[in-house]
Image (cartoon, rainbow, N blue to C red):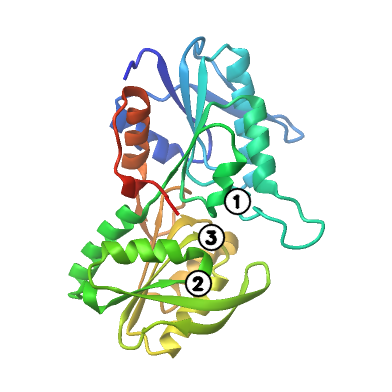
Amino acid sequence: MDKDNVLLFSLTANPNLAKEVSEALGLPLGNSQVSHFADGEVMARTADNVRNKKIYIIQSTATPVAERLMELLVFIDALKKAKAKEINLVIPYYGFCRQDRIAKRGEPITAKLVATLLETVGISRIITMDLHTPQIQGFFSVPVDDLSPIPLFGQYYRRKLAEIGAKTRDVTVVSPDHGSIHRARDLASELPDSQLAIIDKRRPAPNTAEVVNIVGDVKNRICVMIDDIIDTGGTVLASVEALYAHGAKAVLVGGTHGVFSHDSGKALLGSRIKDLVVTNSIEHDLPGISVISIAPMISKMIEVSEDGGDIPDSWMAFY
């Protein structure tokens, strides 16, 4: 990597993750300055010389989603006007991702709108983590690298099972709905001889779930439920209770993106979940929730982008 011509920036969403990536790459963080006018307007700029430099910006569009997105747009515009050669975005959590289709008449496809905004302002590439649905990659005309956290979850759960004296053959990996079956399937492949189950549920309203049935064997088994987003926790809690009602011995829950709206993290910790783990794609300070760092994956992707080479296929979210 030509470190003299590559600059790494962090805005407000992922300061700790950006620091980890910076240290892994041996590349100091650039001087990004984000402030607000009295009426809430965003100002984002850098005092660094970015002319003819390749830029990487680390920023999840997480809560407050619109503000974090606006920071990105303003900062990218500032870099373009300062004659940056190339602007690459590392968006660990891609906000607005659940609005990826028209479910009811009159609804927007906001995931596509955000992609258009980012491309219009002038990005070259996206590196992201576990997109909600694969079609979001098609919303961009620039290259999109969608990383899969499943190998990291596999490592975590093999250690966790060893700690509690359980075998992977005693595990059933559970998909909380049909949309996450590929995550559950891939995690099951990381846990030898484990089984697979799917929760069949209905959504009468956003963030509300009704469990209809469980397809698969969960009785007297350790259930590991894996999903991409944990938001209000309603889906998780309903699914956990259904698993216990069907005879599960213990329920462990993993999610790539811990949104945890309305203090749902505390509610989940107070439930019958035996272990709750998320990645640091969204940063929180919630004691009791385990965190897997995605910094090694992101830093490796940046290295590969600059120096060439390959990364394992298992890192890519091939659906």
Residue at the image position 54 percent from the left and 54 percent from the top? 133
Q: Residues within 10 Å of mark 3 (few under 14, many from 20)?
A: many
Residue type of the residue flagged with mark 3: Phe
* Furthest residue in direction right, as rendered: 106
Position of residue 87 relative to residue 266, above or below, is above
* Residue labelled with disc 3: 260
Marks 1 and 2: which is nearer the front?
1
Q: Earlier in the sequence, mark 3 or mark 2?
A: 2
Residue at the image position 53 percent from the left and 37 percent from the top? 12
Q: Quadrant of the N terminus?
A: top left
Residue at the image position 23 percent from the left and 64 percent from the top? 158
Position of residue 5 relative to residue 268, above or below, is above
Residue 106 x %, y %: 82, 56
Q: Earlier in the sequence, mark 3 or mark 1?
A: 1
Q: CA distance from mark 3 to mark 1?
A: 16 Å
SS category of the residue bearing label 3: loop
Residue type of the residue flagged with mark 1: Cys
Position of residue 3 relative to residue 69, above or below, is above
Marks 3 and 2: which is nearer the front?
2
Is 133 situated left or right of 291 in this image?
Answer: right
Residue at the image position 62 percent from the left and 33 percent from the top? 71
* Residue labelled with disc 2: 236
SS category of the residue bearing label 1: loop
Marks 3 and 1: which is nearer the front?
1
Residue type of the residue flagged with mark 2: Val
Q: Do we see residue 197 in this rendering?
A: yes
* Residue labelled with disc 1: 97
